[in-house]
């Protein structure tokens, strides 16, 4: 696998795709990852999660609130899957 590439995309674009729902992170996708890819994807997912949380909260926009919460939920789920797979393979993420 090329350096910093997941399915021909950069780690940054993959993490944004996960947040938007275009890609799902599961154990089958993680099967081919190397240690460096686990760490890079974990850092980038955390960064995108911080960015989503730092955006202003859409107080009176119901669909905006729902969109924001859905993005956060997808990121959280991807982080849980990634951390669990790293723990099974004994890869330190910090």
Image (cartoon, helix red, strand yellow):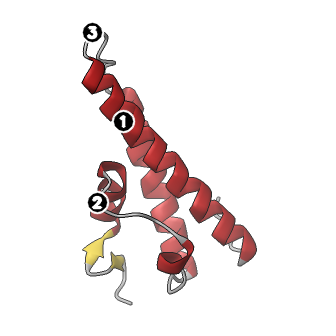
**What residue did someone put label 1 on?**
52
Q: Earlier in the sequence, mark 1 or mark 3?
A: 1
**What residue did someone put label 3 on?**
60
**Mark 1 nearby-residue class (10 Å; few <14, some 14–19, many ≥20):** some
Q: CA distance from mark 1 to mark 3?
A: 18 Å
**Looking at the image, which residue is at 35% across and 77% down?**
6
Q: Earlier in the sequence, mark 2 or mark 3?
A: 2
Left or right of 68? Residue 8 is left
**Mark 3 nearby-residue class (10 Å; few <14, some 14–19, many ≥20):** few
Name the disc covering residue 16, or none: none
Q: Is residue 68 above or below residue 26?
A: above
**Would you identify the image quadrant in which residue 53 lies?**
top left
Q: Quadrant of the C terminus?
A: bottom right
* Viewer-side label of 1, 3: 3
Q: Looking at the image, which is closer to me, 21 or 15?
A: 21
Q: Is residue 39 visible?
A: yes
Q: CA distance from mark 2 to mark 1?
A: 16 Å
């Amino acid at each position: 696998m090329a350096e910093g590439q997941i399915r021909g995309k950069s780690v940054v674009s993959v993490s944004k795709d996960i947040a938007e729902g275009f890609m799902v992170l599961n154990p089958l996708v993680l099967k081919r990852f190397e240690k460096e890819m686990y760490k890079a994807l974990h850092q980038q997912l955390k960064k995108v999660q911080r960015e989503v949380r730092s955006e202003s909260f859409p107080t009176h926009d119901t669909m905006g609130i729902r969109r924001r919460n859905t993005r956060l939920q997808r990121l959280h789920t991807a982080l849980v899957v990634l951390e669990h797979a790293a723990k099974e393979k004994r890869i330190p993420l910090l």
